[in-house]
C-alpha cells in the first residue's frame, strides 16, 4: 500500500496535517538526548525524521533509516540526494532490524508503530539494538480525550481525509486504512505499558496538538 502512495506521500502529509507534521518531528528531535553517534529511524518512509535530525541536532551522527516499502525508500533516497543529505535509507523490517545488538544511541519511529502486526516484537527489537542508556522516541497518532475534539477528529479522519487523500493519491483505500489504524491503536496508557513490558525505563508520553498525536520516550 505504501508503495502505491509513495510518490504523493510527502505532499499529502503537508496538506492533510496542515504542515503540523513537521513541527511534531522537530519536537521528537528536541526531546532526543545530545551526543548520539548513531541514530536509527524505523519505518522511515521518505526520511523526514532523519532530515529533521540532520537539520536540528548537533554534531554529525550516523543516520540510518529502515522501511519495508521499496517505493517509500526510493522516494526518500531521491529526496535526500536532492537536499544533499547524508542520511542512509534502506529496506528493512522494524520487527527484525538489520542492526547489531547495543549499537544505536537513539532509535526513532514516527507514525509507523501502528502499522506493524506485532507491536511488542518491534519494541523488543528496538531494545535489542539500543546501547544501554540509549533512548527510544516514538511519535504516533492518539485519539483526543475532549469529546468535541474527538468528534471533530473522527469526522476529519473518517470522511475528509479519505476523500482528499483518495483524490490526490488515487488510492482512497490507503487513507481509509489510516483512520482505521488510528482509531484501533493503543491509547497512551496502554502504549506506555507495552514499553514497560519491553523493559524500557523512564517512560513518558507527551501529548501534542491537543492530544491528536503523542510523543513517547523511554530508555534502555
Ligand atoms: C505513515 S508512514 C511514516 C513514514 C515516516 N516515518 C514519516 O514520519 O513520515 C508509515 C511507514 O511505515 C512503514 N512500515 C510499515 N510496517 C513496517 C515494518 N514492519 N518495518 C518497517 N517499516 C514499516 C511503511 O512502509 C511506511 O513507509
Image: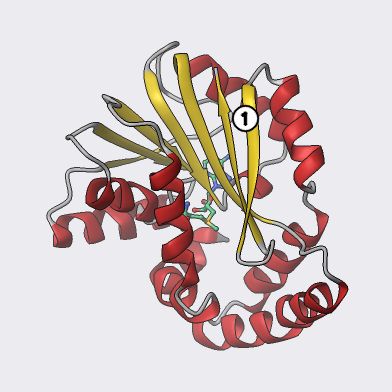
Residue 154: image quadrant is bottom right
Quadrant housing the N terminus: bottom right
Residue at the image position 82 percent from the left and 63 percent from the top: 145
Q: Is residue 152 above or below residue 89?
A: below
Percent position (x, y) of residue 23? Answer: 43, 63
Q: Is residue 19 left or right of residue 162?
A: left
Could you tell whether 206 is left or right of 30 in the image?
right
Q: Is residue 134 rendered to the left or right of residue 204? A: left
The 10 Å Cα crowd at callout 1, few under 14, some 14 to 19, many 20 or more, is: many
Q: Measured from the top left, where is residue 143 in percent x and y?
A: 77, 62
What is the count of numbered marks?
1
Secondary structure under tag 1 reads: helix
Q: Quadrant of residue 32?
A: top left
**In the image, what residue occupies the spot 65% across and 49% down?**
115
Decide which of 28, 112 is in the foreground and name it: 28
Vertical position of residue 43 compared to residue 81: above or below = above
The answer to which of 35 and 112 lies nearer the viewer is 35
The C terminus appears in which quarter of the rendering? top right
Which quadrant of the view contains residue 201?
Answer: top right
User: Is 205 in front, or is 107?
Assistant: 205
Q: Position of residue 177 (x, y in %)?
A: 71, 65
- Residue that label 1 marks: 122
Looking at this view, is 126 or 214 the one in front?
214
Residue 68, placed above or below residue 172: above
Seen from this angle, which residue lies furthest right?
A: 147
Q: Which residue is located at x 75 percent, y 38 percent?
A: 191
Instruction: Residue 190 in the image: state x and y as whole percent.
Output: 81, 39
**Applied colour scheme:** secondary structure
Check mark 1 vs ligand 1: CB closer than 8 Å? yes or no.
Answer: yes
Amino acid at each position: 500500500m505504501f508503495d502505491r502512495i509513495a510518490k504523493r506521500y510527502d505532499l499529502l502529509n503537508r496538506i492533510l496535517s496542515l504542515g503540523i507534521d513537521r513541527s511534531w518531528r522537530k519536537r521528537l528531535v528536541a526531546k532526543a538526548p545530545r551526543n548520539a553517534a548513531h541514530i536509527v529511524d524505523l519505518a522511515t518512509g521518505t526520511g523526514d525524521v532523519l532530515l529533521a535530525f540532520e537539520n536540528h541536532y548537533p554534531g554529525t551522527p550516523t543516520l540510518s533509516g529502515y522501511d519495508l516499502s521499496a517505493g517509500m525508500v526510493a522516494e526518500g533516497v531521491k529526496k535526500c540526494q536532492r537536499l544533499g543529505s547524508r542520511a542512509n535509507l534502506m529496506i528493512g523490517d522494524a520487527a527484525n532490524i538489520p542492526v547489531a545488538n547495543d549499537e544505536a544511541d537513539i532509535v526513532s519511529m514516527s507514525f509507523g508503530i501502528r502499522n506493524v502486526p506485532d507491536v511488542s516484537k518491534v519494541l523488543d527489537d528496538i531494545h535489542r539494538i539500543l546501547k544501554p542508556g540509549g533512548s527510544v522516541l516514538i511519535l504516533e497518532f492518539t485519539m483526543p480525550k475532549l469529546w468535541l475534539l474527538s468528534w471533530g477528529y473522527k469526522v476529519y479522519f473518517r470522511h475528509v481525509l479519505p476523500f482528499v487523500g483518495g483524490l490526490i493519491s488515487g488510492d482512497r483505500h490507503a487513507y481509509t486504512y489510516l483512520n482505521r489504524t488510528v482509531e484501533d491503536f493503543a491509547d497512551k496508557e496502554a502504549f506506555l505499558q507495552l514499553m514497560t513490558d519491553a523493559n524500557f525505563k523512564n517512560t513518558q508520553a507527551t501529548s501534542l496538538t491537543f492530544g491528536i498525536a503523542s510523543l513517547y520516550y523511554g530508555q534502555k
